[in-house]
């Protein structure tokens, strides 16, 4: 098995504050009397319900707003990666020729990126502004943890300044850590539905992956609805095509930095919280597309 630190849109390590509903106070209802208007009773009974309902909607609204913001950021990043892929692929927007662009298009469709957004990115990739975008990688360490940050930017000086500032604010620095990782290809496939169990699904994916030239297979999530197939970095597109030929549904193909087992670290308590905040800060930068760490 392999230890892959996949890109996140939010760090689960950070303790989140949860809004608490106010406690409803049940007032004694006087015995019915003809002199008490019906409207008075209605107001007393309705007030706690409206107040609690307002708070419940507030929580839902904020959660939905956060999810929508992260989704929009993900689409924006994918769009910039497409532009950079077209540039590095000699200007080709043909996914059959430009493997990297093809992989990004597959991922975009898997996460339901709007077609209009995809078309806009491809159109921009053929315009004069596309030449300004470059893909950059930065290395650093902070809080006893190694970081590799990938970005697509039109101003590398700005991007490196922002990354460096985030690390130094918590006592870290820009430093060489790439030796702690291996550059690999990671192909995500949907679990087969024509088998009776998750064990059978894993066995089917593993068999197809080994035939296709992959190195290993690992569940990509807790419910095992997807599997991550590990390959040599230079062979990931070839293996991806071979998996498709064997009837598997590929949802993403991308290069990744897999931490070498000897260099994994753990974090607990206050350090875990601080690392979560740092990862959130890095991932929230407009230019950053992926953040890798050697956290277990």
Image (spheres, rainbow, N blue to C red):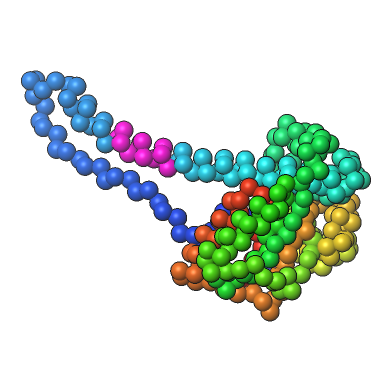
Q: Is residue 51 magenta?
A: yes
Q: Could you say where residue 93 lies in the image, as x and y percent from the top left?
A: 87, 40
Say whether residue 270 is visible: yes
| Range drawn in magenta | 49-59
* Quadrant including the N terminus: bottom right
Residue 269, relative to residue 225: is it above or below? below
* In-front residue for pair 259/88: 88
Q: What's the residue at 46%, 70% (across, down)?
A: 269
* Residue 248 colored in magenta in the image: no
Observer-nearest residue: 110 or 166?
166
Is 267 situated left or right of 58 in this image?
Answer: right
Q: Quadrant of residue 122 in the image?
A: top right
Relative placement, left or right, of 135 versus 51 is right
**Which residue is pictured at 84% across the width and 45% down the height?**
87
Q: Nearer the viewer, residue 2 or 153?
A: 153
Residue 194 lies left or right of residue 95; in this view the side is left
Q: Position of residue 290 (x, y in %)?
A: 68, 56
Main secondary structure of the magenta stretch: helix
Residue 107 visible here: no
């Amino acid at each position: 098995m392999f230890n892959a630190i996949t890109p996140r849109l939010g760090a689960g390590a950070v303790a989140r504050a949860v809004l608490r509903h106010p406690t409803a106070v049940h007032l004694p209802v006087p015995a019915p009397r003809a002199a008490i208007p019906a409207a008075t009773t209605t107001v007393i009974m309705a007030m706690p319900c409206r107040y609690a309902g307002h708070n419940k909607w507030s929580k839902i609204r904020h959660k939905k707003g956060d999810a929508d913001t992260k989704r929009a950021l993900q689409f924006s990043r994918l769009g910039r990666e497409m532009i950079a892929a077209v540039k590095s692929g000699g200007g080709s927007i043909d996914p059959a020729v430009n493997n990297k662009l093809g992989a990004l298009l597959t991922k975009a469709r898997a996460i339901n990126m709007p077609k209009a957004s995809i078309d806009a990115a491809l159109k921009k990739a053929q315009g004069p502004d596309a030449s300004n975008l470059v893909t950059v990688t930065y290395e650093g360490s902070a809080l006893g943890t190694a970081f590799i940050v990938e970005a697509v930017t039109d101003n590398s000086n700005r991007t490196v300044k922002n990354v460096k500032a985030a690390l130094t604010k918590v006592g870290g620095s820009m430093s060489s850590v790439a030796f702690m990782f291996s550059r690999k290809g990671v192909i995500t496939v949907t679990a087969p539905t024509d088998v009776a169990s998750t064990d059978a699904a894993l066995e089917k994916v593993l068999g197809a992956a080994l035939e296709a030239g992959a190195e290993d297979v690992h569940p990509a999530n807790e419910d095992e609805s997807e599997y991550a197939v590990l390959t040599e970095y230079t062979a990931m597109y070839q293996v991806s095509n071979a998996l498709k030929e064997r009837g598997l549904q590929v949802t993403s193909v991308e290069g990744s930095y897999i931490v070498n087992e000897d260099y994994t670290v753990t974090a607990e308590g206050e350090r875990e919280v601080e690392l979560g905040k740092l990862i959130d800060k890095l991932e929230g930068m407009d230019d950053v597309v992926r953040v890798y760490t050697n956290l277990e």
